[in-house]
Amino acid sequence: MFKAPESNAFGQSFRDYDIESERQKGVEEFYRLQHINQTYDFVKKMREHYKKLDKAAMSIWECCEMLNEVVDDSDPDLDEPQIQHLLQTAEAIRKDYPNEDWLHLTALIHDLGKILHLPQFGELPQWAVVGDTFPVGCAFDEKNVHHKYFKENPDSQNPAYNTKEGVYSKGCGLDNVLMSWGHDDYMYMVAKENGTTLPSPGLFIIRYHSFYPLHKEGAYTHLMSEEDFENLKWLHIFNKSKVLVDVEKVKPYYQSLIDKYFPAKLKW
């Protein structure tokens, strides 16, 4: 049987919303806004708008460097530059799974969608870029963090959207489920539309790494397909590292992976 470790690269064991810290109140306010505003209609509009990929043309590495301009208010643990976070995650995975180069690259690029917060990409508010993600179009599971704020989301009152399955059906597959809009789904869209050759588990990790209600709390499994369950095993094996990485030293290796799995320039 496949047993997941206690922590993963996206910080499962590092995230603790119960411990009071100077950022806790800000985090709670963030989730209040997110839970009220992330509706089925909002997500559909965002997906329509961003799937045009008409904001920029740049390489993966250029995007990694651009990400340093972004601050993620929803993550209580991220104090180092974003590129450090990306490379620490990637290097930890490379150490544990040296032969899975697609996984190293997936770890490097998993958060690149956070550029949505920058002016060139729409300057979206934090609640539309970061934080835990969840399905829209069905009932908001109580395992979502700060669940109480969903009562102010109009979808909670809509009979089409407020049942367990909502507009979906049991086992329909996450591919057919609309997730709250943010950097996960945007980066998935960028990778897919630019013809990446990353395998299915890599795309799954990019798209669902912030879906904590699923991979930390076990909610929403009734919507998953068999392939989703297989892919979820890969998301569970990430280990987070806090060891500083020498960016210039490891850059050539990651550049070779970018060249292998992506075109030189991507539409964003």
Image: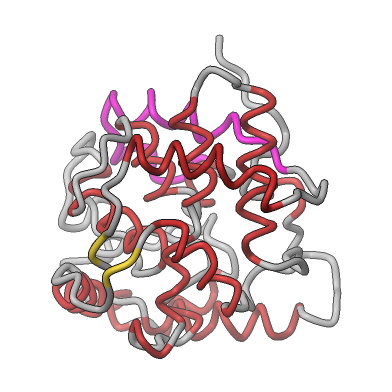
Q: Residue 203 in the image: x percent, y percent?
A: 34, 41
Residue 90 lies in quadrant: top right
Of residues 41 and 170, which is closer to you in this image? 41
**Magenta range:** 218-240
User: Please, is residue 93 above or below residue 142 in the view?
Assistant: above
> Which quadrant: the C terminus?
bottom left
Of the 4 image quadrants, the one containing the N terminus is: top right
* In magenta segment, residue 41: no
Residue displayed at 39% across by 36% down: 202
- Report whether 16 appears left or right of 222: right
What residue sits 51% from the left and 40% below the top? 218
Instruction: Tell whether 56 sits left or right of 80.
Output: left
Rendering coords of residue 42 (x, y %): 24, 79
Which x, y percent locates residue 64? 51, 62
Our reading of the magenta stretch's main secondary structure is: helix
Asked if residue 234 is among those painted magenta in the image, a careful observer would answer yes
Residue 139 vs 123, above or below: the answer is above
Q: Is residue 175 above or below residue 235?
A: below
Residue under the point 30% across and 83% down? 154
User: Which residue is pictured at 28% across the width and 24% down the height?
Assistant: 226
Residue sitting nearer the eye, 152 or 179: 179
